[in-house]
Image: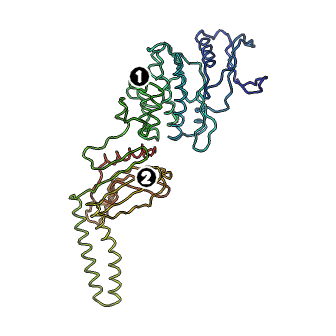
Amino acid sequence: MLALDQQTQALVVIKLLTFNEELTWDTFRLFEREAGTLQSLTHPAIPRYLDYFEVETNGGKGFALVQSYIDADSLEAQLKSGRSFSGSDLKQLATAILDVLKYLHSRSPAIIHRDLKPSNILLADRSGHQVGHIYLVDFGSVQAAQSEDGTRTVVGTYGYMPPDQFGDRAVAASDLYGLGTTLIALASGQNPADLPQKNMRICFEDQVGLTPAFIAWIRWLTEPALDQRANSAEQALEALKQKNFGLKSRSDPSESLSVLSKPAGSRIKLIKQSDLLEIVIPPSGFTLALIPTIGFAIAWNTFLVIWYSTALSSFSYVGLGLALFALGHLAIGIRLIFKILFTLFGHLSLRLDSDKIALTYRLFDRSLQWPRPVPQSQISRIELTKHMTIGGQGRSYGSSRQIIPAQIYIWAGNKKFNIGNNLAASGSVSLSDPELNWLANELSNWLDLPIS
C-alpha cells in the first residue's frame, strides 16, 4: 500500500504480512528474507529499505516492511498500455538490468532474485532516445546462494524461470534466464510460456523483429541447460557491449547460431572493423547467360547505326527525325554495353563508416557513386528480396517475361542503396542466395537493424 511518511512527508510503500490461518511458514520466511535483503542493499535501481516492525491491524497481528516509493509503471503495465520496445530499447534495458544483477551476484553470498519478469521491473523517466531508468522490485523470492551446487528452493513464475529452478536449484545463471525471457516478452508482446518450444528451448525467433546476433544472444541467455547458458552477468554484459555481441569470439554452443559464415568459394571481400564495414564485390566474369545479352547488344547497336546512317543520307526532315529517333534509342545500347563490361570487369563497393554510407561502381580507372553518399544516421531499414521471374515463357529481350533479381536494399532517408544483382546482365546471377543471406546478416548485425 502507498502511505505518507509523517516525518519526511515522502511517499513510501508498505508491505503488510498479517497472521491468519492461511499464513504458511514459507510465506513468513520469505517476507523476513525480503526485509533482511533490502536492508543490506544499496543500489539506485533497488528500492531503499526504510523500516521493519510489528503491527496490530483489524485483521490481527503482523509485520510491516517499509520501502522507498518509485513513481513508475512496470514493464508489464506498459506492454498492456500498448507500448512497444525496439531493439535499441531492449539493449538499454538489458544493460541496465545486467548492471543490477552484477551488483546482486557480487554480494557474499551471492543474492539470486529468482523472479525476473516484466511485472517486477519498473521503468521511469523516458526521454528522447533513452528508454528510461529501470528499477528492480519484489525481493520476496530472493535466495542467497550457499554453495556451488546452488540452493534448494522452488520459487518463480512459470514462463520466466529456467528448468534448473524447477529442479530446486537457483544460481546466477537462473537470473540471466529470467532476463532473456523478459526480453522475449517485451519483443514479442507474448508470455514466453505461450510460445512454442522445441527441446525445452523457447521458439521466439519468428515472433520478434531483432537482429540475428541479438536473437542469438537472447537464445544464449535462455538455454535450458546450465552449461550452455551465459554463466555470469559480467560475461553476458561484455558480449552485449561488443559489435555482434561478441558472439564470434566465444566458444559457447550458440556461436554457430550467431552469424552466418562466408559461403565456401565466395570471392566477395568483407572488411569489418569497429567503425568500418566495406563489402567489395568483384566482377562476375563471363557466363553462358551473358551470350544472349552480348548478341542482342551487337544486333541492337548495329541496327541503330545502320538506321542512323540511312536516315541522315536521305537529306530530308523525315530522315532527320528518324536519325534523332535512333539517337534516342542509343541509350539502350549504351546501357547494355555498360552492363556487359561491368559484369566482366567492374567492381561494386559498399562502404559504411561512422559518418556515411557510400555505394561505388568502379570500371577500369573510372568510378561513380550512386546514390550520392548520405549520413549513416539516416539508415532506417534493411530489405532482402529473392530472385523471381514474372510473366511469360519467352526468352527474347523484349518478351513479356520479367526477371527480378535478388537484392539487398539499405534505406537511408528516401534513398536506397542496393547490392546483389543490380548491374548483372539480364539472365545472369552475380551473387548466390547464400552470399546474399550472409551479407544481409553482416549488415544487420553491424547496423543493428533487423532484416525485413
The image quarter in which residue 331 lies: bottom left
The residue under label 1 is 226
- Residue 82 as seen in the image, left or right of residue 312: right
* Residue visible at 29% across and 62% down in the picture: 342
In the image, residue 371 above or below residue 224: below
The residue under label 2 is 410
Locate residue 37, reporting x and y percent. 60, 17
Could you give the CA–CA distance between mark 2 and mark 1, rounded to whole angstroms? 39 Å
Helix, strand or loop at disc 1?
helix
Q: Quadrant of the N terminus?
A: top right
Q: How has the structure been colored for display?
A: rainbow
- Residue 39 as seen in the image, left or right of residue 393: right
Q: Amino acid at mark 2?
A: Ile
In the image, residue 54 above or below residue 129: above
Q: Amino acid at mark 1?
A: Leu
Q: Which mark is residue 97?
A: none
Locate residue 56, reporting x and y percent. 74, 11
Locate residue 115, reporting x and y percent. 54, 23
Locate residue 24, reporting x and y percent. 60, 10
* Residue visible at 39% across and 48% down in the picture: 277
Helix, strand or loop at disc 2?
strand
* Residue visible at 49% across and 58% down in the picture: 414
Q: Nearer the viewer, residue 79 or 171?
A: 171
The image quarter in which residue 294 lies: bottom left
Q: Tag 2: Cα neighbours inside 10 Å, few (<14), some, or many (≥20)?
A: many
CB-based contact (under 8 Å), mark 2 and mark 1: no
The tag earlier along the polypeptide, 2 or 1, is 1
Q: Tag 1: Cα neighbours inside 10 Å, few (<14), some, or many (≥20)?
A: some
Q: Quick one: which residue is furthest to the bottom in this view?
A: 315
